[in-house]
Image: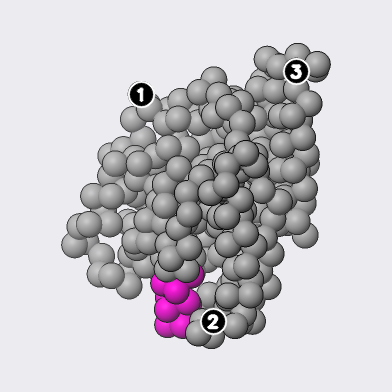
Amino acid sequence: MAKVIVTADQKGGVGKSTTSNFIAYELALKKYRVLLIDWDSQASQTNSFFGLKDVDYTGDNQSNIVNMFNGKSVKPLKISDGINKASFDFIPSNEELLETIEGDALNYKGKLLVLTDYIKTVEKNYDYILIDCPPSFGILTKSALLVADVLLVPIATKSVDEDGIKRFFQKSNSLYANYANMLKSIFVLPTLYDSRMNNAKEMLTIIRLLPRYLENGNLDFFKNIPVEVLEAIPYKVEILEAPAQRMFLREYVETYIASNQSKSINAIITILESITAKIIK
């Protein structure tokens, strides 16, 4: 059955979509069967990364993500690159997802478990399922946490917010205490790191202390879950430019960046490759 990797944080702009995008692509390069789900009604993965803003995946469209809530199948799109011929399945998001979550067609528990029910119907078709969550701790994020085998939490180092980080895990602890789950490991990913900035260094120090906090704090669920803080992802404009070109990061580097200019960005790709390897181990 597929391993489910959930990328979540209650803050926006921390690199959730970027990270999910890269991991999906790297796994596809290795010929794994991959499904990436844009579980965010803001549809950043759908619109920004894949340029599907002008395509209507709403209403009766077979690829409408809202079909999950009606007990119907969802037809994934096939995403491919132009260089390495890597491909994977993708379920786009749209504004109807938020309308459905806020509607009354399903009760709270039904909405919370809809992703669990959907994953059961498709997990035999994939090696890995990645879920890109919204920047909040609402019912969409909660529903994704309940199906996660691996929880990947990107945390931006550009501002110091120790309380915000702890609140995410406190809320998650309460959720896991009340519902069955599959979580086996947690990876914390520092992002947007600029070593020239004192606040970034301070934030990185705080992030590296998270495993101790989760082990020794009043969070009973996390005491038995392995937590690893991954190597920080440096801030690089190329990471932002790649989706603007509707390209995967590796594809963008191989297409547009000359070899004598790409040492630093290739170093970042090496870091991300290492992160991917650890997550799927």
Please state if 136 lies on the left or on the right of 86 as rendered.
left
Q: Residue at x 44, y 74 (%)?
A: 170
Where the C terminus falls, by quadrant? bottom right
Q: Which residue is mark 3?
A: 261
Q: Quick check: 209 above or below 221? A: above
Q: CA distance from mark 3 to mark 1?
A: 34 Å
The reply, left or right, for residue 142 in relation to residue 36 is left
Contact? badges 3 and 1 (CB < 8 Å): no
**Marks 1/2: CA–CA distance:** 47 Å
Q: Secondary structure at mark 3?
A: helix
Q: Pick out the residue farthest to the front.
A: 198
Secondary structure that dominates the magenta span:
helix
Residue at 45 percent of width and 30 percent of height: 48
Rendered view: 218 above or below 161: below
> Would you name the residue on which mark 1 appears?
54
- Residue 207 versus residue 278: which sits nearer the camera? 207
Report the disc number at residue 45: none
Left-right relation of 247 to 253: left
Choose mark 1 or mark 2, whichever is in front. 2
Please report the bounds of the magenta region as a residue range: 169-179
State the image quarter where residue 44 is shown.
top left
**Mark 2–mark 3 distance (CA, rounded to whole Å):** 45 Å
> Does 122 lie within the magenta span?
no
Is the Cβ of the residue at disc 2 closer than 8 Å to that at disc 3? no
The residue lying at 34 percent from left, 57 percent from top is 69
Among numbered discs 1 and 2, the one appearing first in the sequence: 1
Tell me: residue 53, above or below residue 99: above
Mark 2 = which residue?
217
